[in-house]
Image (cartoon, coloured by chain):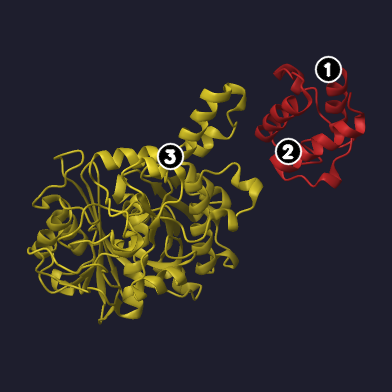
Chain colours: A red, B yellow
Amino acid sequence: MATRDEITSGLADILEEVAGVNPDDVAEGKSFTDDLDVDSLSMVEVVVAAEEKFGVKIPDNEVQNLKTVGDAVSYIEANH
Amino acid sequence: MSNVDVVVTGLGATTPLGGDVASTWDALLAGRSGVSRLTTEWAERLTVKIAAQLKVDPSEVIDRVRMRRLDRSEAIALIAAKQAWADSGLEDAGLDKERLAVSFGSGIGGATTLLNQDDILEESGQRKVSPHTVPMLMPNGPAAWVGIDLQARAGVHAMASACATGAEAMSLGLDIIRSGRADVVVAGGTEAVIHPLPFAGFANMRAMSTRNDEPEKASRPWDKGRDGFVFGEGSGAIVLERADHAKARGARIYARLAGAGITSDGFDIVQPDPECKGGIRAMTKAIRDAGLTGADIAHVNAHATSTPAGDMGEIIGIKAAIGTHPVITSTKSMSGHLLGAAGALESIATILAIRDNVVPPTINLDDPDDRLDLDVAAHKARPLEINAAMNNSFGFGGHNVALVFTRV
């Protein structure tokens, strides 16, 4: 069972790989689109990579609710 | 003949001979070959194991994250176009982007992406296919990315005429400026499909050289020992500009794109007309469009790809349309055949031949075909006063494009 910090750190690795986001900028309060500049196509890649890394299923209709890094961490924490 | 003068104010390229125009031109004048043995595992299973591969990988120029969403053909188009743009000095010239257009094509397009993503689909399922797949494989992708990068707003065009694509892109650029739709057009060609499938296809047409043990000698236009073209990758870009616009901003002008001639054979999907009838008509049109006569053309950068069937028809064509006087060359002997980028790179070589008054060599012409009765700059670059020169490009499907560049 990963902690919230571990999930955040895992997402930071994915965001760096897929979208070139500086891991130091990744925090629970940050918005993927507004703060981290992740566009819609890159977000699809982030979701697919997160599913693989954390062993979760993130359905498309759930992705629209994941506005911030914290939203994603909460979803992964609750479902993995 | 048009009353609108169009000039060349910027050049860019990334090729098997160098990562920019200067290094590519140096290599061409020095007679260096850009052909080498493929080191990929798949090449060992094919009959063709050589290619003219990029000297500088695009990943050395474009950052990793951006490369994830670019097909290789798009990445190198961006590199060449940005070089040409910087070279033109237009960045700081306050150009209205509604007067800037792009004309940039590819012979095969994003086939590498298509094939690689299909492998992923078959192996791992839909979920793993990149969401960037479509913009990476679409044939207008290179033109579109160049247009986005330069914020071109007068139209972005992507032609596909096989190995005549790069030259046809120049011709369309000329038309766009003459029509008044734009003051500046970034025109070019790009190709990057060193992948086993196109290799297998071309190899099975018996169109490619299998001189695998002597890669540097494999591309040998007009030589008796020629056995096919050498597959190359690269991109070339040229900034075309209305002459009065260029002069008003004090731009450095390389040459004038004085005329273009386009025809189609209406004959065969792959075989060129053996009498070069379509090529003759294209060359004749280009000369007339430039307001010149054959006697004015001092040099021809020929299409000659090193295939047994293709090389000699053009010789008939040059004699018929221009005469026996021009000094000709095939820079493909060094660069390999860049397919959709060939006409762009060879236009650059033609422009620089005018600038420097020198014909780049045709290497490997050790034993000329008995029917070769024109003066070729064999082995070594040839100093020559050149005030007007032609670049020819022909493509599968029967596309013929001739361009005439002149000294300003």
**x, y (%) of residue B283?**
18, 59
As drawn, A3 above or below B224: above
The local secondary structure at tag 1 comes to: helix
Q: Is there CB contact under 8 Å for labels 1 and 2?
A: no
The local secondary structure at tag 2 comes to: loop
Residue to which mark 2 is pinned: A38
Count every numbered label the image shows and give the total.
Answer: 3
- Distance, label 1 to label 2, CA atoms, is 23 Å
Tag 1: amino acid: Asn
**x, y (%) of residue B358?**
30, 78
Quick one: label 1 or label 2, which is nearer the N terminus? 2
Residue A46 seen in the figure: yes
**x, y (%) of residue B269?**
20, 38
- Distance, label 3 to label 2, CA atoms, is 26 Å
Please identify the quarter of the rendering in which residue B373 is found.
Answer: bottom left
Residue to which mark 1 is pinned: A79
The local secondary structure at tag 3 comes to: loop
Residue to which mark 3 is pinned: B139
> Along the line of sight, which residue is nearer the eye, A31 or B359?
B359
Q: Which of the two marks, 1 or 2, is nearer to us in this view?
A: 1
Q: Name the residue located 43 percent from the left edge and 38 percent from the top edge.
A: B111
Q: Is there CB contact under 8 Å for labels 3 and 1?
A: no
As drawn, B407 above or below B368: below
Tag 2: amino acid: Val
- Do marks 3 and 2 both belong to one polypeptide chain? no
Q: Chain of mark 2?
A: A
- Do marks 3 and 1 both belong to one polypeptide chain? no
Q: Chain of mark 3?
A: B
Mark 1 Cα within 10 Å, few/some/many (few <14, many 20+)?
Answer: few
Q: Name the residue located 58 percent from the left edge and 28 percent from the top edge.
A: B129
**x, y (%) of residue B205?**
23, 40
